[in-house]
Image (cartoon, rainbow, N blue to C red):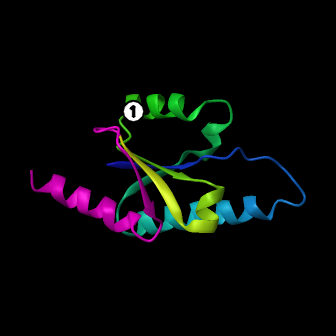
Amino acid sequence: MLAYLFNSLQLLKKTDSKQKLHQRTVCEGLLQEFLEVGISTWPGYLDTMSLSLENLHTKYDEMGVLFTVVVSESTLKSGLLLVRNRDTTIRETMHISEIKCYLLKYISASDSI
């Protein structure tokens, strides 16, 4: 299982960019939470520079990435993430506090099949 943590904003150097710092902290914190519970995770936000979101989904679908988690500027304000399932292509919005349990339930369910 590879859960893909995707930062939807481009990383640009700005002197007044506190939002970028917070956003990177959120992504790295989420990455650490996933790794601590055994969810293989890849912080692919450096790949987002030149591709559209749809092209990235296609690329990661071909790689076999099961979930894409999008952290955006609105996540910093509302705590809501966009989660996309490769198998169903359904995009769901959920609170950042729910994503770990959501992925663990999916992993547990697939273990019993």
Left or right, 16 with respect to 106, comes to: right
Is 53 covered by the magenta stretch? no
Left or right, 50 with respect to 71, comes to: right
Residue 67 at x, y percent in the picture: 38, 47
Residue 12 at x, y percent in the picture: 79, 46
Judge the density around disc 1: few (<14), some (14-19), many (≥20) Cα neighbours within 10 Å.
Answer: some
Which of the 4 image quarters holds residue 46? Answer: top right
Decide: is 61 above or below 25: above
Q: Tally the numbered discs.
A: 1
| Amino acid type of the residue tagged 1 in the rendering | Asp
Identity of the residue drawn at 44% across and 34% down: 60
Residue designated by label 1:
61
Identity of the residue drawn at 73% across and 47% down: 11
Residue toward you, 1 or 17: 17
Extreme left residue here?
A: 113
Secondary structure state at the residue bearing disc 1: helix
Extreme right residue here?
A: 15
Identity of the residue drawn at 58% across and 61% down: 75
Residue toward you, 60 or 98: 98
Residue 18 at x, y percent in the picture: 79, 65
Decide: is 13 above or below 88: below
Identity of the residue drawn at 43% across and 63% down: 35
Residue 56 at x, y percent in the picture: 52, 33
Q: Which residues are magenta?
A: 86-113
Decide: is 1 above or below 76: above
Decide: is 58 above or below 47: above
Which of the 4 image quarters holds residue 51? Answer: top right
Left or right, 21 with respect to 34, comes to: right
